[in-house]
Image (spheres, rainbow, N blue to C red):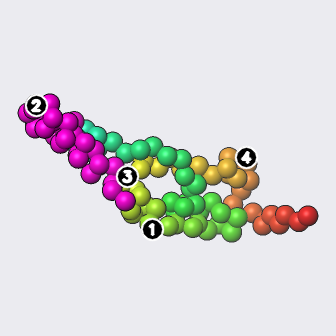
Amino acid sequence: MIPPAVSALQNLFVASWQAQISFTQPIEILKINLMKKIPIGIRSCLLGENVRFDGGHKRDSYITGTLGQYFEFHPFCPEMGIGLGTPRRLSIWKK
């Protein structure tokens, strides 16, 4: 999979070549686009916050390391948002 920044660079290079404009203008546009990360909501426990039922977390290094290069994380915890504390009793759903 081609990272969005590389794809953007390819598109800018082709556009500048076709329009025969100076190459410095697309580079400046690319610098601005590279600095912007895509905002995304994510569960707090995946970022390492101790908000799970057992007082722990489920930090994922792929999310924080690799995906963190491309995304701006906005953490949330629905359980904490409705007032459930931590640690809390495990909820078991039965039919």
Q: Residues within 10 Å of mark 4 (few under 14, many from 20)?
A: few
| Mark with earlier residue (4, 3) | 3
Q: From the image, state whether disc 1 or disc 3 is nearer to you.
A: 3
Residue 54 in the image: state x and y as whole percent.
Answer: 68, 69
Give the main secondary structure of the magenta stretch. Answer: helix
Q: What amino acid type should be assigned to the residue bearing mark 2? A: Ile
As measured in the structure, the alpha-carbon distance from the residue carrying label 1 to the one carrying label 2 is 42 Å
Residue 28 visible, this orientation: no
Q: Amino acid at mark 3?
A: Tyr
Percent position of residue 26, x then y: 17, 36
Q: Residue at x 19, y 41 (%)?
A: 14
Task: Please indicate whether residue 8 sits to the left or right of residue 20 in the image.
Answer: right
**Magenta stretch encompasses residue 26:** yes
Q: Residues within 10 Å of mark 1 (few under 14, many from 20)?
A: few
Which residue is under mark 4? Answer: 82
Q: Secondary structure at mark 3?
A: loop
Relative to 65, say whether 78 is above or below. Answer: above
Give the position of the C terminus as an image quadrant: bottom right
Q: Residue at x 28, y 40 (%)?
A: 33
Judging by the rendered image, the residue that carries numbered circle 1 is 61
- Asked whether the residues under the numbered discs 1 and 2 touch, taking CB atoms below 8 Å apart as contact, a structural biologist would say no
Q: Which residue matches tag 3?
A: 70
Q: Name the image quarter holding the N terminus.
A: bottom left
> Label 2, label 3: how many angstroms apart (C-alpha)?
29 Å
Circle 4: residue type: Ile
Q: Earlier in the sequence, mark 1 or mark 2?
A: 2
Q: Which residue is mark 2?
A: 21
First in sequence: mark 2 vs mark 3:
2
Residue range in magenta is 1-29
Mark nearer the viewer, 2 or 3: 2
Frontmost of labels 4 and 3 is: 3
Q: How many C-alpha atoms fall within 10 Å of the one at disc 2: few (<14), some, or many (≥20)?
A: few
